[in-house]
Amino acid sequence: MTSRKQVPASEVILLRVAGSDRRGLTLAFSELLAQHEIAILDIGQSVIHDQLNLGMLLEMPREGMASVVLKDLLYKGHEMGVSVQFTPVTADDYDHWVSGQGKKRYIVTLLARKITAMHFARMAEVVAEQGLNIDDIVRLSGRVPLGQATADSRACVEISLRGDPVDGSIMRSRLVQAAGDLDVDIAFQEDTLYRRNRRLICFDMDSTLIETEVIDELAAAAGVGEQVAAITERAMQGELDFQESFRARMALLKGLDESVLSEVAKRLPITEGAERLIRHVKALGYKTAILSGGFTYFGEYLQQRLGIDFVYANQLTFDANGKLTGEVVPPIVDGARKAELLREIAARENISLEQVIAVGDGANDLPMLNTAGLGIAFRAKPIVQQNAKQALSTMGLDGILYLLGFKEQHQLDDD
């Protein structure tokens, strides 16, 4: 019986290189490995405060060569002034690592003016409870200066997870609780092909794209501010039917002169980060829309100022003397209408709903937030934060760029 020559088995070694970063260091080690025709099964590198950590998972033949390669790597480390360590990886451990590649992947994004150890610890506690493994941690924001965070500071860390949570709804609830306790935003989303492939972003207007409720501004000018503000707040909290509350507020504005609307429009406070976000997404080819329970008069003003593609809101009516009639042209844009309009725009532009982002703050925004692939409750009421897919409260609208995975250096510079 002819014996078959057994192919020599290979062994797996984890190479770790650490030390002061310098030009050509990674090149030197990879060239050495290339000389020995070594296969690299996995590789990762990070630099924190000019200190490099390089890891390579290497496959090497057992018969004599491994010791030669390891000796050469040690010499190279001494030559380059860095620490070199080796860790054998068993066949079982390697097979277990390979089997994990089919598991789902998720992204947790921490956003705050300044991220603390407590922020990270609370997030990591929830992740561990849910049986997920942290694969990678990347800082998306720019370098943070020492001292107290300023009003325009931005800090963001993205954590890549692997596995399946024990209970996704409980995990989201725990993260929302942690975010509220610590004044930090914690977004949790599945890492799908749509995450960086969005094509449409739809904004609520009042208290989202602008930092005010226009109807409250008009009411103050008409001398009925307190009455209208009370109705507005109850509607945004979900305590009143939007259409009913809207008609009640409009009736109080009857007789207001059109010139007042012009003055209010000129002083609308644009939300922090709105212009930067819109400039960035438009450069990427996104379509943009305002879907508002407010008024087209102001939506169209913002359309011209910000370069918005579509505006859908409520059309005011005036009498022959240029006074508000206290009515609007039907249909009233309420929560259901916003979601309907989002679908219509997406269908017309041939955009999948998974590629749509919706941003809003009130209860009447929830239908569109839950229709879009990425729904973001922005500086929202508690009921909205609890029921939206994501929430953003600690920074401006341009924080959305981090949820899409854009690093600071990949974002457009401010004018």
Image (cartoon, grey):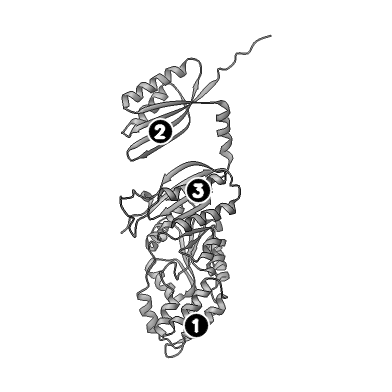
Count of labels shown? 3
Residue 137: x and y in percent read 44, 43
Q: What residue type is labelled 1?
A: Met
Q: Name the residue under label 1.
A: 250
Residue 101: x and y in percent read 56, 38
CA neighbours of label 3 inside 10 A, class few (<14), some (14 to 19), many (20+): many
CA neighbours of label 1 inside 10 A, class few (<14), some (14 to 19), many (20+): some
Specify which label sits upstream in the sequence, 1 or 2: 2
Q: Nearer the viewer, residue 2 or 126?
A: 126
Residue 146 horizontal side relative to residue 399, left or right: left
- Kind of element beneath mark 2: strand
- Kind of element beneath mark 3: strand
Q: Residue 54 carries which label?
A: 2
Whether residues under marks 1 and 2 lie with C-beta atoms below 8 angstroms apart, the answer is no
CA neighbours of label 2 inside 10 A, class few (<14), some (14 to 19), many (20+): some
Residue 120: x and y in percent read 45, 48
Q: Which mark is residue 86?
A: none
Q: Nearer the viewer, residue 191 or 311?
A: 191
- Kind of element beneath mark 1: helix
Q: Where 256 falls versus 360 (above or below)?
A: below
Specify which label sits upstream in the sequence, 3 or 1: 3
Q: Name the residue under label 3.
A: 107
Q: How far apart are marks 1 and 2 (CA)?
A: 64 Å
Q: What residue type is labelled 3?
A: Ile
Could one spot residue 352 in this view of the protein? no
Q: Which amino acid does label 2 sit on?
A: Leu
Q: Where 410 falls versus 264 (above or below)?
A: above
Q: Distance between the residues labelled 3 and 1?
A: 43 Å
Q: Where 30 falls versus 414 (above or below)?
A: above
Q: Distance between the residues labelled 2 and 3?
A: 23 Å
